[in-house]
Image (cartoon, rainbow, N blue to C red):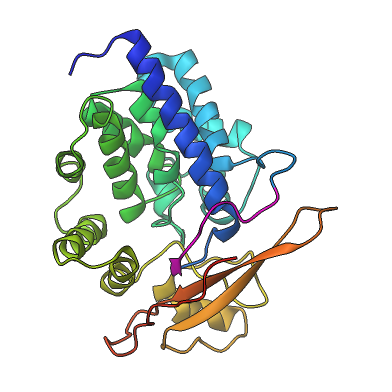
């Protein structure tokens, strides 16, 4: 497919708008693992959307590209992490701490990093696709350079997968073809590839999206984290619970799946709140343990 400047700009704006919408929609549920049946925004947006680091980081990377052009790499991005990125939560703090101790990428993303396989890299991958439209191999290469600063393993594979798919989507529109292109940039045995295979199998089997989501959480139980009761800002991988929960002097959670109603408060000064029902699917759950369809609509 040939693409002129006008068409490129249209698709670029669509990418940015879609990213903004998705990031705002999901922001109240960051770190929540389960089946989320969401119908529209659940937070007060009367003053506009809140800042989103998934977008802001990409603007910092754009500054780096404007200065260094095609020569931008993990080492340059690591310098921008230390100069421009102020938060120290999760993998952000780990990578900056490693960098300050003299560990360059990819060591900065892999050493002592419980969040190495988290979502933090692939959710900022659009910038590389937008800078390399129709060139998935190039987009994936830059995404790997980016992700290796604060992630490792699956966290890097996911970034390469998404960047390649997004880049190819500038010139192709067939979903299965786009997925195949993206899969060609990650190891066949990695968790990302297994997750994609699970979803494809669910679709071929006629499962609903909720059933497919539950199946995915059972096939690939690792996730961005779990919001622990009483400690909403703590996010750890599910398979690390033997290590994590003793550190926080809490009992390990039961292995059974469960339902939970999350209450999303309004912004400061706003009245009212909204509730959303979430189904948590624990690793190790059997077919009989899987939560059934909930008839209660999200409010």
* Residue 36 falls within the magenta-colored stretch: yes
Q: Residue at x 18, y 65 (%)?
A: 206
- Residue 269, compared with residue 284, is above or below; it is above
Query: From where the camera sits, is residue 96 visible?
Result: no
Percent x, y for residue 248? 62, 79
**160 or 165, which lies in front?**
165
* Residue 161 falls within the magenta-colored stretch: no
- Residue 113, compared with residue 75, is above or below; it is below
Percent x, y for residue 134? 24, 24
Q: Residue at x 32, y 49 (%)?
A: 158
Percent x, y for residue 177? 14, 39
Q: Which of the image's four quarters has the N terminus?
A: top left
Residue 70: which quarter of the image? top left
Percent x, y for residue 241? 46, 78
What is the magenta range?
34-44
Residue 84: which quarter of the image? top right
**64 or 106, which lies in front?**
64
Residue 138: which quarter of the image? top left
Q: Residue at x 38, y 57 (%)?
A: 117
**288 or 46, which lies in front?**
46
Q: Which of the image's four quarters has the C terminus?
A: bottom right
The answer to whether residue 86 is left or right of residue 266 is left
**91 or 298, which lies in front?**
298
The answer to whether residue 104 is left or right of residue 196 is right
Count all numbered tags in the image, as a single digit.
0
- Residue 36, compared with residue 150, is above or below; it is below
Query: From where the camera sits, is residue 59 visible?
Result: yes
Residue furthest to the top: 5
- Residue 35, compared with residue 105, is above or below; it is below
Main SS, magenta region, reads: loop
């Amino acid at each position: 497919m040939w693409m002129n400047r006008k068409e490129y700009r249209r698709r670029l704006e669509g990418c940015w708008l879609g990213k903004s919408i998705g990031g705002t929609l999901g922001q109240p549920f960051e770190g929540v693992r389960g089946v989320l049946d969401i119908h529209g925004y659940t937070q007060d947006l009367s003053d506009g959307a809140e800042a989103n680091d998934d977008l802001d980081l990409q603007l910092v990377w754009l500054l780096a590209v404007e200065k260094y052009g095609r020569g931008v790499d993990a080492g340059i991005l690591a310098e921008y992490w230390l100069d421009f990125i102020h938060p120290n939560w999760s993998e952000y703090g780990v990578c900056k701490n490693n960098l300050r101790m003299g560990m360059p990428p990819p060591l900065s993303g892999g050493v002592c990093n419980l969040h190495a396989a988290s979502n933090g890299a692939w959710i900022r991958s659009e910038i590389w696709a937008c800078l390399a439209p129709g060139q998935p191999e190039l987009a994936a290469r830059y995404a790997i350079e980016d992700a290796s600063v604060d992630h490792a393993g699956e966290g890097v594979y996911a970034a390469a997968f998404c960047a390649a798919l997004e880049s190819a989507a500038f010139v192709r529109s067939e979903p299965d073809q786009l997925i195949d292109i993206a899969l060609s940039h990650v190891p066949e045995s990695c968790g990302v590839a297994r997750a994609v295979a699970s979803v494809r199998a669910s679709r071929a089997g006629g499962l609903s999206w909720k059933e497919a989501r539950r199946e995915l959480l059972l096939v690939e139980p690792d996730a961005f984290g779990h919001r622990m009761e009483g400690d909403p800002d703590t996010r750890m991988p599910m398979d690390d619970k033997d290590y994590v929960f003793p550190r926080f002097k809490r009992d390990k959670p039961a292995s059974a799946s469960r339902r939970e109603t999350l209450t999303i408060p309004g912004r400061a000064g706003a009245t009212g709140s909204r509730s959303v029902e979430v189904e948590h699917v624990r690793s190790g759950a059997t077919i009989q343990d899987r939560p059934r369809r909930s008839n209660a609509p999200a409010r």
